[in-house]
Image: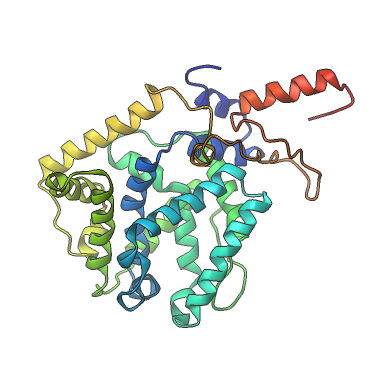
Amino acid sequence: MSRHWIAKRIQQLDPTTDYDEVWKLAAAYRPTDFIMNLIYAVTFPHFFVRRLDALPLFDGGDGKILKKADARSDDTSWKMQVWWHYGSHHEKTRQNVESINRIHQHYAKTYPESFDRNGTYIYTLCYEAAGMHRLMLRVGLKGISEHEKVAAVHYWAKMSTIFRNATSGEPLTGFPDSFEGIMAFMDTWEGEVVPKHEMGNLAAVAIIRQFAEKYFPRLLHPLVYQWITSLYPDHLIEAYDLKRPKKLVVKAFRLFTAAFLWTGEHIAPDPADTYTERRNGGRRSEPAPPASATAGADQDKTAISGCPYLRQQQVNAANIKDPDVHP
């Protein structure tokens, strides 16, 4: 297997039909706990700019975002990696998302207006589809590939059909049908003028503190704060009254982040296993079915490597032994 096989494999696939595998390749292999926590610290404050969205997270001061910050970060990262590893068609993904639907329904009993607006869900899914692309552009990189953009539209459009409005119980509607549409939806949503609220700064600072305390000694925490806030767009800085570092400091941290991300993709060898497989202690997870698999088709339950190259080699070997078996 090539030292850098992921990008090559992505280019071999059709993102309109193989979008589950493209997204898995792009999102499920390279991340580590540190990277997932970094992305969480940069990403999650986007989701509670509006007071209604913050209420269930804050939950009167008892929310996990404040009281169990590590667990909140880990739960979010692990759930998403399940989706990315298994794909949008897999039953494990559906079960995982259904658990989130039930959590939303629970909080909707107390905060019904917080879960009522369709756009809140669509913005969150759009951000998951394009958030990494936006971060890469912000630090000076070229962003994700065209193959990944097309796959992101199809993958997250499919994921949007699994979630539902927790207040009404209705399916979500209006997920954009192009990557440009995803970017435009986020720009429009973030461009709405909304009042600041008392929970914003507390929650944002708690998220940054969690990342700093988990990975860095106390003396470096002020630098970590500057690093994370240097990656935030202007509307988050304003919404939460955060202190933006000086321009030269912002530029330095963004260059550092660009080098960090670029090195992970172009210098470090591509892993053979996904984040989920590594987190499971090396136990091979059930592979996701091909994106073209028909609903209800029997799937091979044999535990094999998440690497598509190794998986195909195993399938080929099995076919040689039994020529009547087709992949």
Instruction: Decide if residue 107 is on the left or right side of residue 320.
Output: left
Quadrant that contains the N terminus:
top right
Depth check, front residue: 5 or 213: 213
Rendered image quadrant of residue 249: top left
Q: Residue at x 84, y 19 (%)?
A: 321
Q: Position of residue 174 (x, y in %)?
A: 56, 62
Q: How many marks?
A: 0
Please say whether residue 116 is visible from this viewpoint.
no
Q: Position of residue 65 (x, y in %)?
A: 34, 64
Up-down: is 7 above or below 184? above
Rendered image quadrant of residue 49: bottom left
Q: How is the image coloured?
A: rainbow
Depth check, front residue: 199 or 146: 199
Q: Residue at x 47, y 76 (%)?
A: 107
Q: Position of residue 161 (x, y in %)?
A: 62, 60
Depth check, front residue: 174 or 96: 96
Instruction: Decide if residue 16 is on the left or right side of residue 295.
Output: left
| Name of the residue lying farthest toward the right | 324
Q: Residue at x 31, y 51 (%)?
A: 42
Quadrant that contains the C terminus:
top right
Q: Position of residue 226 (x, y in %)?
A: 16, 48
Q: Residue at x 35, y 53 (%)?
A: 43
Depth check, front residue: 326 or 250: 326
Instruction: Decide if residue 254 is on the left or right side of residue 170.
Output: left
Rendered image quadrant of residue 113: bottom left
Please say whether residue 106 is visible from this viewpoint.
yes
